[in-house]
Image (tube, grey):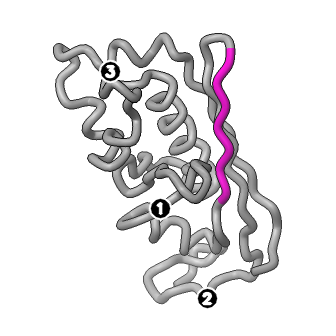
């Protein structure tokens, strides 16, 4: 697919993660990361890995910015950051996230994540098809006419 490049970026301080891991915070982390992501975000001894969690959260935010879905909430569980070949992060979209990406005309999404100095940053890159999509009868045109 050819089209205009689109880039999303997000920064998550590692200091935010302990509050999400605190049992008193309830199921907050389970509303943000899928079971597969939670499984992957563990240290070799099985403990939660704050850097891996922060990286996935930053990547999800960066991917969401590609959708250009102003005013909408991030589809946390529909945007998964998994482990691809060689350990590289891989994006899997489902449900509302997949529909938003399709509506935005996005091509395949690539993500890069890095951690340093107490922060995690993620960059998501794709192309967006710039061909206008036909207006449906229920969607007003720019002049407000059906």
Relative to residue 98, is residue 68 drawn left or right? Answer: right
Relative to residue 3, is residue 44 drawn left or right? Answer: left
The magenta segment is 110-116
Residue 20 shows which numbered tag? 3
What's the residue at 44%, 31% (across, down)?
53
**Seen from this angle, which residue lies furthest front?**
45
Q: Mark 1 points at which residue?
A: 92
SS assignment for the magenta stretch, majority: strand
Q: In the image, residue 90 lies at what x, y percent? A: 55, 56
Q: Mark 2 points at which residue?
A: 134
What's the residue at 64%, 83% (across, down)?
133
Marks 1 and 3: CB-CB under 8 Å?
no
Using the numbered discs, state the Cα–Cα distance from disc 1 to disc 3 in whole angstroms: 23 Å
Nearer to the camera, 103 or 140 = 103
State the quadrant of the N terminus. Answer: bottom right
Q: In this view, does 71 lie above or below 105?
A: above
Tag nearer the camera, 1 or 2? 1
Examine the structure image and report whether residue 115 is included in the region drawn in magenta: yes
What's the residue at 17%, 14% (across, down)?
24
Nearer to the camera, 85 or 106 = 85
Using the numbered discs, state the Cα–Cα distance from disc 2 to disc 3 in whole angstroms: 42 Å
């Amino acid at each position: 697919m050819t089209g205009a490049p689109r880039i999303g970026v997000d920064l998550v301080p590692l200091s935010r993660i302990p509050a999400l891991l605190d049992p008193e915070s309830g199921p907050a982390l389970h509303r943000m990361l899928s079971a597969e992501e939670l499984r992957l975000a563990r240290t070799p001894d099985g403990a939660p890995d704050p850097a891996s969690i922060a990286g996935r959260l930053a990547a999800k935010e960066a991917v969401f910015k590609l959708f250009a879905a102003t005013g909408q909430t991030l589809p946390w569980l529909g945007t998964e950051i998994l482990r691809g070949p060689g350990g590289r992060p891989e994006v899997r979209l489902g449900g509302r996230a997949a529909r938003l990406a399709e509506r935005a005309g996005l091509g395949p999404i690539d993500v890069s994540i890095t951690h340093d100095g107490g922060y995690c940053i993620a960059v998501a890159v794709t192309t967006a098809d710039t061909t206008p999509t036909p207006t449906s009868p229920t969607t007003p045109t720019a002049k407000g006419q059906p």
